[in-house]
Image (cartoon, rainbow, N blue to C red):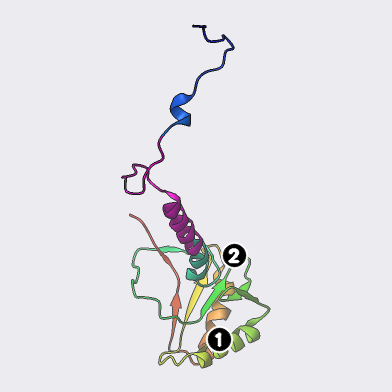
Amino acid sequence: MTAPAASGRKRRHGLVHKKQAKLDQLRNEINVTPLVDVCLVLLIIFMIISKLLSRGKEVPLPETLNHQTEADKNQPIVAVDADGKLYFDKEEMPDLRELKKAVVEAWRATDAKEQRVYVKAAKTTPYGKVYPVIMAIRDLGVTGVDLGTVEKKE
């Protein structure tokens, strides 16, 4: 009998001659690929929808103690930022005349019984820049102007 050669190679008999798993046997591995696919699809949907959920130009609103919790009625949104720039929804308006046209067109597009406008003004905006906007909207014959605020935390 001759001794095996000392070549430093390891024998791999166990891996080479391993039995193939039968389809009838239970597998103890978890397949996470479908889970990852579903999570990625949900993430993409959330990223797209989150942009659509916010309405109007984002401005820092003043805080109030008496906050009305009435639901949004999809009325037109007018915003005035800290610099006094006018926005209808998220589109910047050059002047009050164009703002009035945009509000009237929004009312024509919907069959709203009440013609209300939601006005959001930044908390640092001077009242002198917000007042003409409210008066221009009132000139259109609106039934009400809702002012945007944030509820103050006690």
Dot 1 amino acid type: Val
> Which dot, 1 or 2, sits closer to the camera?
1
Mark closest to the chain's N terminus, 1 or 2: 2
Is 98 placed left or right of 103 in the picture? right
Which residue position is annotated with label 1?
103
Q: What residue lies at 59% left-to-right and 12% top-to-bottom?
A: 7
Question: Could you tell me which quadrant the C terminus lies in?
Answer: bottom left
- Above or below, 99 relative to 56: below
Q: Residue at x 57, y 67 (%)?
A: 126
Tell me the magenta residue range. Answer: 19-46
Instruction: Count neighbours of disc 2 (C-alpha within 10 A) and say few if under 14, some if 14 to 19, many if 20 or more.
Output: some
Q: Is residue 26 magenta?
A: yes
Q: Position of residue 1 (x, y in %)?
A: 49, 6
Query: Amino acid under label 2?
Result: Ala
Q: Check if residue 34 falls in the magenta segment.
A: yes
Q: Position of residue 53 (x, y in %)?
A: 47, 69
Q: Residue at x 34, y 75 (%)?
A: 70
- Residue named by callout 2: 82
